[in-house]
Image (tube, rainbow, N blue to C red):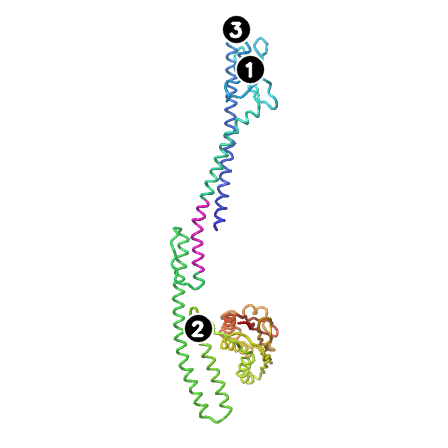
Amino acid sequence: MRRRLMLATTMALAVAVMLLGGPLAVFAGQLARARAEAEVQSRADGLAAWLDLYQSVDSPIGQAVLDGYLSESADQLRVHIDVELGDGATMSAGAPITGKAVEISASHLTVTSVSFQVSWWALQLKALPAFGLVVLACLVAMSVGVAFASWQARRLAAPMVYLSATAEQLGAGQLRIRPTKSGIEEIDLVAEELARSGDRMAKRLSVERQFASDASHQLRTPLTALAMRLEEIEYLTERDDVREEVRISLEQIERLSDTIDELLGRNKPGAGTPRRWLRLSEVLGQQQEEWLPVFAEADRSLVLDVDESLTVTASPGALSQVIATLLENALTHGKGVTTLRARAVQGGAAIEVEDEGPGVSPELAPKIFERSFSTGGSTGLGLAVARDLVAAEGGRLELSKRQPPVFTVFLSSSR
């Protein structure tokens, strides 16, 4: 901004100096030349008057009379004089003018003519000091203007730099900002609005964190009661199939509690995501075990293809939630066999969820990860939340193939 202000002010100043100083310099030069010509004309008129006086009294005219008008002082121009008297006699004085010359004539009564010749270049040199003085004044004005433009640019740019830093602090999460008055009304208005926006965001975050804390407390109580009830059923029953279902349900409740804790932890300032080494075969195998009955009920198949040695660094609850979201999406919108696959890639692993459905149309592909976007009557938050969870783990979630649909989760295997 400072450079632009400097450039704009300098350009405006340069245009003003050119429009005003240029004609003024030309006018000053022409005026100085006109004065020099007037001075020569005055000398010619004076000589003509003296010659007329000499002839009126029949006094002889000596050469000294003409020589006295060649140059009276150092400021006067050197001239060549030609005189034609009334009786036809001619006289001259001074060295002839070489090069381009300007002739200035005068006549007086009995004198036929007096002609003064002056060098054209000498007249231009008389105009040069005045022209140069105006040019010098323009340069001084330009220098003063540039200095003023630099000061003004710094004065205007400094509050903008501060305003940019304030906006950066707001974006980084420092919501309680107190702007400093700059004395520039427009900038102060923006700064005050940023401060008000920060206050509003701080209040909203406080409300959301309180809501999340209350929701967590309210969720833990029924989850704990449900877990105790399932443990009681497991203790009382003797059927192995019921015990297996109870075990799976308790694992789901435990993962749900861990997921709630992780989501709440991300909302706390400075809280990091708890990550550890995970063997993908265990995480994906657990998801297959949970989703197989649901797929079987829909007359669908869920196939697992994973290398036992593949490991990544991630939060187990977050990764399980992402895989569950992708499997639910495949169950809802896909068809045929759903394949849950994991393969090694450079620096980590790629987890793929693929089904035999019609896929995603080119029009919908750019929108499927947007919040509140849904084609099946759901909330439209599943894929958006899943992508955020993967990003929080340092990876990425993308639709790697539209038909048949393949969703891929890329995770790092480095600590």
Residue at the (44%, 76%) spot, across then down: 261
Task: Determine the CA span between mark 1 and mark 3.
Answer: 18 Å
The secondary structure type at the circle numbered 2 is: helix
Q: Which mark is residue 265?
A: 2
**Residue under pointer 3:** 59
Image coords of residue 217 (percent x, y): 39, 78
For the record, the magenta segment spans: 149-168
Give the amino acid type for the residue marked by disc 2 in the picture.
Gly
The residue drawn where x is 49% and y is 46% is: 8
Count neighbours of disc 3 (C-alpha within 10 A) and say few if under 14, some if 14 to 19, many if 20 or more: few
In front: label 2 or label 1: 2
Residue that label 1 marks: 114
Q: CA distance from mark 2 to mark 3?
A: 124 Å
Q: Quadrant of residue 213?
A: bottom left
**Residue 204 in magenta?**
no
Identify the residue at image location x=49%, y=93%.
239
Name the N-terminal-most of marks 2 and 3.
3
Q: What amino acid is at disc 1? A: Val
Check whether the beta carbons of the residues at disc 2 and disc 3 lie within 8 A of each other: no
